[in-house]
Image (cartoon, rainbow, N blue to C red):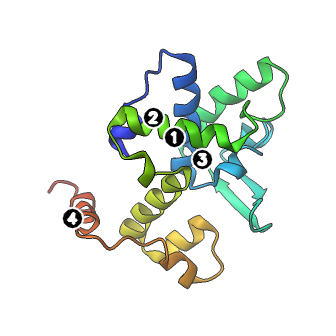
Amino acid sequence: MKLFFESFNLGKKSDWYYYHVFRIQYLTALRISDIMRLTTDQVKTKHFYIIEKKTKKKREVYLCDEAFTLSQSLRKKAEDIGSKYILTKKDDSSYRRAMKIYCRKAGVDPDRVSTHTLRKTIANRVAILKGTKAESRLLNHSKLSTTELYLDNSQETVESAIDLVSGGV
């Protein structure tokens, strides 16, 4: 993910936009379909509720400081053009295409990454730091068995988990 996020040129308008979208998606573990439905009113606070498009379940969303700052930038741009939604592109295929473009720029295999990868990655980090119950809550899963499908037990993940929780100590 680090290489992916470093591939954006934030001085370029389209890169700036997609960086904000993908970073918010990563930091919230929301599906792209749910981010596309976020309104400018919802993101005025750090805590709000959504009804997930896929599951129709109510979900509490928390915006950490970085996600809140990013969402405020998108909110301002949306309000400037009179949109009630923070995302100006309303077709999820444009986000899938952009994901592939930025993966190539980062030297990451675009066939192994999707917008859903952002959700899975942050979920795995939460599981490492706080356990699968916290991960399940983040993903708004009713059953722990559903959450367990997200767990990555590769050696690379185990090693990065050790580095993450050790804090370099």
Camera-near label (3 vs 1) is 1
Q: Which residue is mark 1?
A: 99
Where is residue 56 drawn, in percent x and y?
A: 80, 66
- Taking the spot 65% from the left edge, 30% from the top edge, the residue there is 72
| Residue 79 falls left or right of residue 63 | right
Q: Which residue is mark 4?
A: 159
Q: CA distance from mark 4 to mark 2?
A: 26 Å
Say what amino acid the circle numbered 3 marks.
Answer: Leu
- Taking the spot 77% from the left edge, 68% from the top edge, the residue there is 57
Q: Which residue is mark 2?
A: 102
Disc nearer the start of the sequence (3/4): 3
Disc nearer the start of the sequence (1/4): 1
Q: Which residue is mark 3?
A: 63
Mark 3 crowd level (few <14, some 14–19, many ≥20, 10 Å Cα): some
Camera-near label (3 vs 4) is 4
Q: Quadrant of residue 154?
A: bottom left
Q: Quadrant of residue 68?
A: top right
Q: Residue furthest front?
A: 111
Callouts 3 and 2 close, C-beta under 8 Å: no
